[in-house]
Image (tube, rainbow, N blue to C red):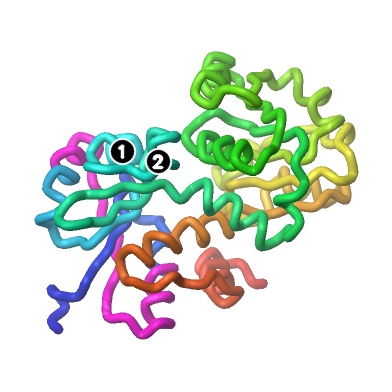
Amino acid sequence: MSASKIPTAAVLGWPVKHSRSPLIHRHWLARYGIEGDYVRHAVAPEEISDFLSSFATGPFIGANVTVPHKEAAFAAVAKADGVATALGAVNTLWLEKGELIGGNTDALGFLANLDQHVPNFGARGGPAIVLGAGGAARAVIHALKARGFAPVYVVNRSRDRAEAMVERFGAPVIAAGWQDVPGLLKDAALLVNTTSLGMEGQPPLEIDLAPAPDTMLVTDIVYAPLETPLLKAARGRGLATVDGLGMLLHQAAPGFEHWFGVRPEVTDELRRIILSDMGVTA
């Protein structure tokens, strides 16, 4: 089979040059002995609608979609799965009988990451605090609501964006401000950061975790750096923590299955490959 005929999937974004998705999918292709490829494909925002409208005639069998194209992808698909419909965003594309189909695996990736590292996570329940009210927060809130966490407090500097999450998801989601965090921490079972604070090149996320119960779990969807200031502070406080790398790995698996016919496993080996690319030894 010539290189031009090898089944190829892609990650679509703007920019996309720093995406680690090719490392993930090429590892799985090699591990399962599948002839195929996965590449980065940058698409400018003004070009994404036209690109997706002709996707079925293009070079790719499917794609992951990253910022800023997830809502445009949702608008472009012929059909969307239930999670994508609930979130109004698509992060995974595939073709069925020439039609472009979309799904969203961010919520699945978030939960699978916690389940892998904290096996009793699903049975915890209780109050959860979600920091941020962007697209990532939508996926996390959907996941927590599905797992029965209640109430789910959405904390955002712009109160209207937090209120928009309440309108989208309804009970048990409650909007809150940053000034409310110390009081909310007292009974919280879970604290999730979905903001860019703490990411490389961004200001740190500074929260006093002293009021939190010793049983609270802290997780951050940021994975560069692997241990964010929030996770470091939580670990210093003696709290259980989960970094965000596993979410990236687990959200990738359903797309690979759609495109190449095998449900891949998220292994320690794969995690080490990505950490090595990040310059982290583990």
Tell me what residue is drawn at x 22 percent, y 42 percent: 78
Residue located beneath label 1 in the image: 74
Q: Position of residue 90 (x, y in %)?
A: 36, 43
Q: Position of residue 247 (x, y in %)?
A: 55, 55
Please report the bounds of the magenta region as a residue range.
Answer: 24-50
Quadrant where the C terminus lies?
A: bottom right
Q: Is residue 180 left or right of residue 109?
A: right
Q: Is residue 130 above or below residue 236?
A: above
Q: Position of residue 204 (x, y in %)?
A: 66, 38
Q: Residues within 10 Å of mark 2 (few under 14, many from 20)?
A: many
Q: Quadrant of residue 158?
A: top right
Q: Amino acid at mark 2?
A: Ala
Tell me what residue is drawn at x 36 percent, y 85 percent: 33
Residue located beneath label 2 in the image: 84
Q: Residues within 10 Å of mark 1 (few under 14, many from 20)?
A: many
- Number of numbered tags placed on the structure image: 2
Q: Nearer the viewer, residue 87 or 59?
A: 87
- Look at the image and tell me whether residue 202 can be seen: no
